[in-house]
């Protein structure tokens, strides 16, 4: 836009369009290139309009449905329609102010119907509503609205702080739940492992005792057959005494003490044998009683 220039020729640059008047009245639009004007016939170049896309940033402050003051930063991209450049030249004195006024009107009518969370989720709907309203109005003035971007939504500082604290508290609560579940899984797995270990330990002890019993039985039978005049009781006494001394030997080797005090003498050895025999007899009688009760 500009004042009329009475010149004989002019060059219109690319991405621009010129408005030509005759005696102060609109005559035609001049496309990019070299044009000749006849000042004697009243022709003159009234002004130039750019057909490039322009960008206008509009900051709108409004209130949401839950009484939170927010600032919305909108970016409006618009351009002059070539076919209607004369309307854009003559109809609007300041198109930026016109666009800004309509953005204020639409945003302040739509945002108070939404809560703050809904505004963040539906900011595209706000941009769409502004685009539809501006496109309908500005088309009559020779402008086309290309895009509207809702660049940013800025709540009040205290609201942002409260939202961050709520988010942090929720994440801490979720982390505590996950941590408790993890500890629960560890305890359950540990208990299952201990139960399995005890079960396998019991099976091992049972198999060990069974093997010892089978070995003792085999040794008694072999000794009785090879050495004439010996009874099973005498062989059992000999084996028990041998195992007793082997146990004492292992105890002395594995302990930090190098000296082990044990009773000595034939009488004490006989007492040890009797104690072992009595223990075995009591265990055998107990097993017999249990079998009778079960029957």
Image: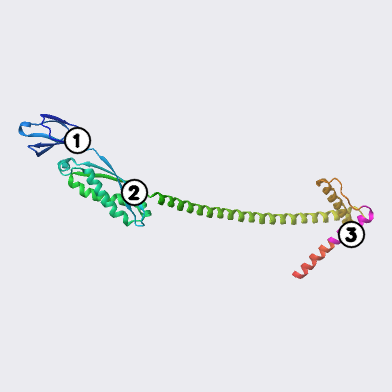
Q: Residues within 10 Å of mark 1 (few under 14, many from 20)?
A: some
Q: Which residue is mark 1?
A: 16
Q: Which residue is mark 3?
A: 274
Element class at badge 1: strand
Please state the horizontal and vertical placement of residue 43, each as a whole percent of the image.
8, 34
Residue 180 higher or lower than 288, as above or below? above
Quadrant where the C terminus is found in the figure? bottom right
Q: Residues within 10 Å of mark 3 (few under 14, many from 20)?
A: some
Q: Which residue is mark 2?
A: 71
Q: Nearer the viewer, mark 3 or mark 1?
A: 1
Q: Magenta span covers which residues?
A: 264-279
> If you read the primary sequence from the N terminus, does the residue marked by circle 3 or circle 1 appear first?
1
Quadrant where the N terminus is found in the figure? top left
Q: Residue 61: within the magenta? A: no
Name the main secondary structure of what is drawn in magenta: helix
> If you read the primary sequence from the N terminus, does the residue marked by circle 2 or circle 1 appear first?
1
In the picture provided, is 291 more to the left or to the right than 119? right
Q: Residue 275: within the magenta? A: yes
In the picture provided, is 144 more to the left or to the right than 122? left
Res. 143 in view: yes
Q: In which image quadrant can residue 20 be found?
A: top left
> If you read the primary sequence from the N terminus, does the residue marked by circle 2 or circle 3 appear first?
2
Q: Are marks 2 and 1 in contact (CB under 8 Å)?
A: no
Q: Residues within 10 Å of mark 2 (few under 14, many from 20)?
A: some
Q: In which image quadrant can residue 198 be found?
A: bottom right
């Amino acid at each position: 836009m500009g004042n009329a220039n009475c010149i004989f020729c002019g060059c219109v640059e690319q991405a621009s369009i010129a408005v030509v008047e005759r005696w102060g009245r609109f005559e035609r639009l001049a496309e990019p290139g070299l044009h000749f004007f006849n000042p004697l016939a009243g022709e003159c170049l009234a002004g130039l309009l750019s057909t490039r896309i322009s960008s206008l940033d509009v900051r709108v402050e409004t209130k949401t449905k839950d009484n939170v003051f927010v600032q919305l930063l909108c970016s409006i991209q618009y351009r002059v329609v070539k076919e209607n450049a004369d309307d854009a030249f003559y109809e609007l004195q300041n198109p930026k102010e016109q666009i800004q006024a309509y953005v204020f009107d639409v945003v302040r009518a739509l945002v108070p119907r939404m809560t703050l969370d809904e505004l963040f989720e539906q900011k595209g709907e706000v941009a769409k509503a502004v685009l539809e309203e501006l496109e309908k109005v500005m088309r009559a003035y020779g402008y086309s609205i290309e895009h509207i971007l809702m660049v940013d939504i800025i709540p009040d500082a205290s609201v942002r702080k409260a939202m961050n604290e709520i988010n942090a508290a929720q994440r801490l609560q979720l982390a505590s739940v996950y941590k408790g579940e993890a500890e629960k899984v560890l305890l359950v797995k540990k208990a299952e492992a201990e139960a399995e270990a005890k079960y396998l330990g019991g099976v091992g002890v049972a198999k060990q005792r069974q093997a010892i019993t089978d070995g003792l039985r085999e040794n008694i039978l072999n000794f009785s057959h090879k050495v004439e005049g010996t009874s099973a009781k005498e062989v059992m006494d000999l084996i028990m005494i041998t195992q007793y001394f082997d146990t004492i030997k292992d105890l002395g080797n594995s302990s930090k003490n190098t000296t082990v005090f044990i009773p000595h003498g034939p009488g004490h050895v006989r007492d040890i044998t009797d104690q072992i025999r009595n223990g075995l007899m009591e265990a055998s009688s107990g097993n017999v009683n249990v079998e009778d009760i079960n029957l």
